[in-house]
Image (cartoon, grey):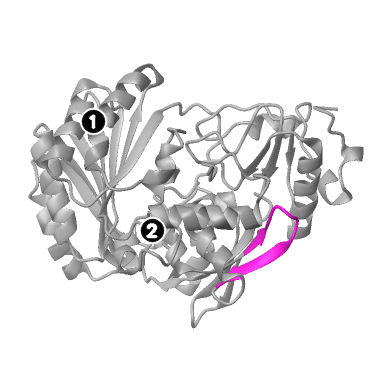
């Protein structure tokens, strides 16, 4: 028995997948990528009906409830201490419904690397993040900034439908034709509205990608960041580029992906990036998209303990570049990551999804050692006025004011109205809850 939970106390649909602290597999399930947890029980539903049973059981128990797809998020939302973790990893099927139109169905518990591998034989891909270990459900309800984003959009931009268990225990289809208000909300604020069990996407035809990694001498960090920003904005939308800088090092690293296999076009698009700073190394390789985002299924130990802040920006102009360079130079920022957005992402109307940031070109992420949390928060306060919006998946500050950064005023008001309809008691309240 753990926290009042026994196999006999559970609905029959959940007994087989129950893992208690005394069970051998518990040690591999208790933690997430960046947070150490000690839940009273981990449940592994295999069907939407079992999710309904689990939700009902958790609500009756009054224990904390966490929902996990991959457990790769930086927050503590997908584990807890003394509560129930609803682990969707058994709901991981990937099915090509129509190779001609690209319609595919993916379980919320799959990892994106595994989904990419399953879709690859059909020549299909859904733009996802930059790690194949990320769970489908978490990314696909938040937005999905990935290595083909400028060509193929956010992950949510490919979503055609979602099956979601709402707080009242109903299993609903959310799409443009069914429950369109819920479909709007799921694409950017889904964690607040229920548990998505599976998605349908319209995957893109992707014959392969040309992936380039480059190491730069970034001694002139401020100037380099501005030149990097200019190059990203001028690049064709087939090119999506992510930049990584590290405290104590003047060697920056970039992952630059051309979505397609046109080597001459990729070479032309890459040329401006190779002229930004002295090069320390690099290589290019054509590969299937699935190889780019392969999933190693690394064990989650909670060992990644960075404190993180995040924001969006239209340009990497001088006020932003100076402050970011200062954070890296001072050691406040253990890592600085700048992901390109724009392109097709910005073709979508800002009101079409709950993720309303459709004019920015960059997503900025800073991670700091816990010992430097105070410095990071203070320095971020100086940067904040120069930013324009927030992607919640990378943000650790739980101040309710971050909701106003993540959702423009009209978007937030609409989300709160829908929250009152679909989750009036606030059952789903662990991942940036939509407080009034």
Q: Is residue 11 magenta?
A: no
Image quarter of the N terminus:
top right
* Residue 136 makes an appearance in the image: no
Residue 292 pos. (x, y %): 38, 54
- In depth, the one of 252 and 371 nearer the eye is 371
Q: Which residues are magenta?
A: 163-175
Give the side of residue 143 with respect to residue 365, left or right.
Answer: right
- In depth, the one of 12 and 250 nearer the eye is 12
Residue 25 pos. (x, y %): 72, 34
- In depth, the one of 163 and 6 nearer the eye is 163
State yes or no: discs 1 and 2 in contact (Cβ < 8 Å).
Answer: no
The residue under label 1 is: 382
Q: Residue furthest right?
A: 8
Q: How crowded is the residue under tag 1: few (<14 C-alpha within 10 Å), some, or many (20+)?
A: few
Q: Residue at x 11, y 58 (%)?
A: 271
Q: Residue at x 49, y 76 (%)?
A: 102
Residue 422 pos. (x, y %): 65, 56
Q: Residue at x 88, y 49 (%)?
A: 12
Residue 268 pos. (x, y %): 13, 64
Check residue 356 in the rendering and tell me which mark sits there, or answer none.
2
Q: Residue at x 57, y 45 (%)?
A: 70
Q: Earlier in the sequence, mark 1 or mark 2?
A: 2
How far apart in space, not on screen, are marks 1 and 2 (Cα)? 24 Å
Give the side of residue 364 with respect to residue 195, left or right.
Answer: left
């Amino acid at each position: 028995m753990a926290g009042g939970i026994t196999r006999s106390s559970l609905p029959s649909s959940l007994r087989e997948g129950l893992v208690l602290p005394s069970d051998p597999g518990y040690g591999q399930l208790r933690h997430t990528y960046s947070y150490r947890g000690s839940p009273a029980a981990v449940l592994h539903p295999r069907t939407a009906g079992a999710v309904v049973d689990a939700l009902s059981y958790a609500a009756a128990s009054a224990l904390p409830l966490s929902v996990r797809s991959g457990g790769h998020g930086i927050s503590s939302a997908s584990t807890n201490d003394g509560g129930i973790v609803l682990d969707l990893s058994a709901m991981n099927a990937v099915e090509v419904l129509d190779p001609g139109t690209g319609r595919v169905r993916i379980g919320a518990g799959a990892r994106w690397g595994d989904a990419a591998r399953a879709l690859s034989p059909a020549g299909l891909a859904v733009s996802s993040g930059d790690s194949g270990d990320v769970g489908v459900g978490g990314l696909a309800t938040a937005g999905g900034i990935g290595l083909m984003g400028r060509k193929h959009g956010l992950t949510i931009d490919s979503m055609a439908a979602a099956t979601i268990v709402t707080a009242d225990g109903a299993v609903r289809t959310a799409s443009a034709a069914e429950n369109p208000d819920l479909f709007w909300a799921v694409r950017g604020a889904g964690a607040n509205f229920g548990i998505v069990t599976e998605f349908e996407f319209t995957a893109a035809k992707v014959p392969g990608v040309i992936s380039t990694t480059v190491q730069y001498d970034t001694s002139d960090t401020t100037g380099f960041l501005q030149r990097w920003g200019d190059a990203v904005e001028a690049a064709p939308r087939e090119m999506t580029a992510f930049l990584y800088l590290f405290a104590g090092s003047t060697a920056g690293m970039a992952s630059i992906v051309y979505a397609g296999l046109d080597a001459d076009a990729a070479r032309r698009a890459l040329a401006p990036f190779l002229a930004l700073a002295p090069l320390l190394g690099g290589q290019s390789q054509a590969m299937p998209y699935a190889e780019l985002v392969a999933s190693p299924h690394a064990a989650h130990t909670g060992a990644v303990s960075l404190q993180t802040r995040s924001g969006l920006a239209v340009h990497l102009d001088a006020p932003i570049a100076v402050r970011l360079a200062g954070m890296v130079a001072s050691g406040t920022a253990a890592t600085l990551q700048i992901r390109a957005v724009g392109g097709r992402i910005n073709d979508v109307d800002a009101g079409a999804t709950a993720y309303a940031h459709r004019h920015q070109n960059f997503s900025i992420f800073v991670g700091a050692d816990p010992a430097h949390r105070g410095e990071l928060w203070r320095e971020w306060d100086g940067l904040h006025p120069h930013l324009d919006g927030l992607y919640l998946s990378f943000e650790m500050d739980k101040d309710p004011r971050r909701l106003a950064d993540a959702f423009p005023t009209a978007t937030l008001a609409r989300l709160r109205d829908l929250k009152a309809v679909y989750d009036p008691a606030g059952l789903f309240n662990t991942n940036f809850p939509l407080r009034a």
